[in-house]
Amino acid sequence: MSKTTVARQIAVDAERLIGLSEQLHAHPETAWEEHNSSRWVAEALVEAGFDVTPAYLGLETAFHATYGSGPFRVALCAEYDALPGLGHACGHNLIAAIAVGAARALAPLADAAGLTIEVYGTPAEEGGGGKIELLERGAFSGVDLAMMAHPAPVDVAEAEPFAVSHSHVEFRGKASHAAAYPEQGINAADAFTIAQVAVGLLRQQLPSSVRVHGVMTNGGEAPNAIPARTEGRWYVRAESLAELAATEEKVWRCFEAGALATGCQLEVTPESKPYAEFRTFGPALEAYRRNAVELGRVFDESSPARRMNRASTDMGNVSQLVPAIHPYVGIGSLPALNHQPEFAAHCVGGDAERALLDAATALAWTALDLAPETP
């Protein structure tokens, strides 16, 4: 009966949830700049009677919302940051609406089920590590179960993300006229080239569990001037934080080689704390899988598109401290994949709307399955 109540409530809320998703999609905001997005998501919870704390723990675009007073605390994570230049090409508009939908559907049952429903508005997942910042300030303390659902081309139940570090790289040299006084210059672009070649050669000795990739964001300013400064952003991924640390040591030696060969100065600055690998809570995963199948979702274990479950997330850090799941819900986007403009286009409309409502229902049902009481 309680699951029927959840499904009925999500059906009643469908227009509101879809409208929220579309609003976020139409007005993308990048990491730490999600001022409107966080407010809109919080407002949808205030409407349902949630007690909302904005600017949670000193983070301007984070919030914390609660409902109920049961002993079993369920946290639903809402992400809403967009990708620079790509908008909601990873579907965080849907993640936020899914969390709101599940929370609003559980609220009328919370006390009878022995639940306290919490929604964490978590900014800056796309490289900023918002959840890590929240964790270090005391968020999620005492939570019994943390959940969220992420859009993907196809449904995948279990998250298996890489650990990842995000770094800003800068070489500083000396400008000079490239034709008249080239010997007076120290070429920061050459330093970056040497580093990239060295990383390319290093890949032969790296295990298949490792990924190293990045972009140059500033390669110089004029073709007739020796570049005095170049910058880039680089990610290193591995199966675990331990493997990540060992791999980073090798990668940064490649950048040091560029500095040594050219005489440039090198500065590597972390953009956030490293994202951890994911630790899945088995009972919740099995409950989610069962509930998703009941709703008609299909898990295609052979699809290459299921590899979105390897994408790094700061939800991995939450999972190291709190029982957690992070399933993926398919939006029928193929051949479009996450982080492509075509995927952003698929994050609104028919298939995305069904995914939103199904994922919200499946997460809410999962919370009820693990609740200490049966309402």
Image (cartoon, rainbow, N blue to C red):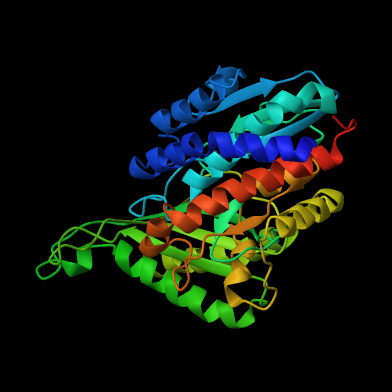
- Most foreground residue, 15 or 247: 15
Q: Is residue 38 left or right of residue 1?
A: left
Snapshot quadrant of residue 25? top left
Seen at 71% across and 40% down, the residue is 364
- Most foreground residue, 243 or 123: 123
Above or below: residue 37 compared with residue 199: above
Q: Is residue 71 left or right of residue 26?
A: right
Above or below: residue 229 compared with residue 183: above
Quarter the C terminus occupies: top right
Residue 76 in sight here: yes
The percent coordinates of residue 61 (x first, y second) are: 48, 28
Above or below: residue 47 compared with residue 312: above
Q: Is residue 282 left or right of residue 75?
A: right
Residue 139 in sight here: no
The percent coordinates of residue 89 (x first, y second) are: 42, 56
The percent coordinates of residue 80 (x first, y second) are: 49, 40
- Most foreground residue, 247 or 18: 18
Seen at 32% across and 62% down, the residue is 188
The percent coordinates of residue 356 (x first, y second) are: 55, 48
Count of residue discs: 0
Residue, far bottom: 204
Seen at 19% across and 58% down, the residue is 221
Residue, far left: 180
Q: Is residue 45 left or right of residue 343?
A: right
Seen at 41% across and 50% down, the residue is 88
Quarter the N terminus occupies: top right
Snapshot quadrant of residue 49? top right
